Image (spheres, helix red, strand yellow):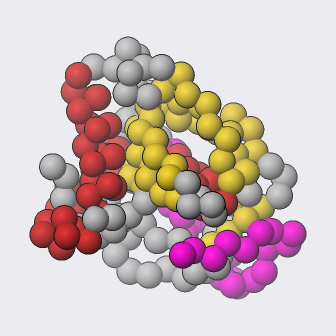
Amino acid sequence: MLTMNDIVRDGHPVLRKVAEDVILPASLEDKKLLNDLMMYVQNSQNPVIAEQYGLRPGIGLAAPQINVSKRMIAVHCSDEKNNLISYALFNPKIISHSVEKAYLTAGEGCLSVDEAIEGFVPRYARVTVKGYNIDNEEVKIRLKGLPAICFQHEIDHLNGVMFYDHINQEDPFKPIENAIAIERM
């Protein structure tokens, strides 16, 4: 089981590398790793398990965050209608996105970043993501709101991009034009 000790911290070189594609069909080792990513995110949201193992709660995790430079992510969060959006994917990519932007009013956090970095992170309001599930089946997902933001955050990790790279350095809370402000529950 993954713990906070397995998660590399900001400044680790793997977080700035572009991750390698996973060769499909995925190996048993890669499937186990993808499953471990999802288990961490799910366990981190369970207060009892999180306390028992010292897990910081998260809604997404990418393989580079555990020092594996491969294109794998796990996302486990709810949308605005409280539907659970839960996917573990190999080689995810954004295949289309809205012109409209969105951002979390409270800003974004990251399991690899220990300190709070304040500011609005502009993202696309809607994205369509394509990837492959643990059974090597192609999956296409249309997302908006928090799940769309979470997927963009995790896919950024696969490209060596950190959330704070998107924050306006001169004016971190500068309103984002024509963007949807999303309050996180």
Q: Work out whether residue 92 or residue 144 is closer to the camera in this orientation and state it.
A: 144
List x then y, in percent, for residue 62.
39, 48
Q: Which residues are magenta?
A: 157-185
Q: Seen from this angle, which residue lies furthest right? A: 178
Of the 4 image quadrants, the one containing the C terminus is bottom right
Q: Residue at x 62, y 37 (%)?
A: 141
Q: Residue at x 69, y 34 (%)?
A: 95
List x then y, in percent, for residue 170.
69, 83
Q: Is residue 161 visible?
A: no
Q: Is residue 178 left or right of residue 109?
A: right
Q: How many marks?
A: 0
Q: Seen from this angle, which residue lies furthest left? A: 52
Q: Work out whether residue 141 or residue 152 is closer to the camera in this orientation and state it.
A: 141
List x then y, in percent, for residue 88.
41, 39
Q: Work out whether residue 81 or residue 61 is closer to the camera in this orientation and state it.
A: 81
Q: Work out whether residue 5 or residue 169 is closer to the camera in this orientation and state it.
A: 5
Specify the principal SS of the magenta part.
loop
Q: Is residue 131 left or right of residue 35?
A: right
The answer to whether 73 is drawn above or below residue 114 in the figure is: above
Residue 147: image quadrant is bottom right
The answer to whether 93 is drawn above or below residue 86 in the figure is: above
The answer to whether 131 is drawn above or below residue 10 in the figure is: above
Q: Residue at x 53, y 35 (%)?
A: 92
The answer to whether 173 is drawn above or below residue 61 in the figure is: below
Q: Seen from this angle, which residue lies furthest top? A: 25
List x then y, in percent, for residue 113.
38, 70
Q: Is residue 62 visible?
A: yes
34 within the magenta span: no
Q: Is residue 110 left or right of residue 2?
A: right
Q: Residue at x 19, y 65 (%)?
A: 49
184 within the magenta span: yes
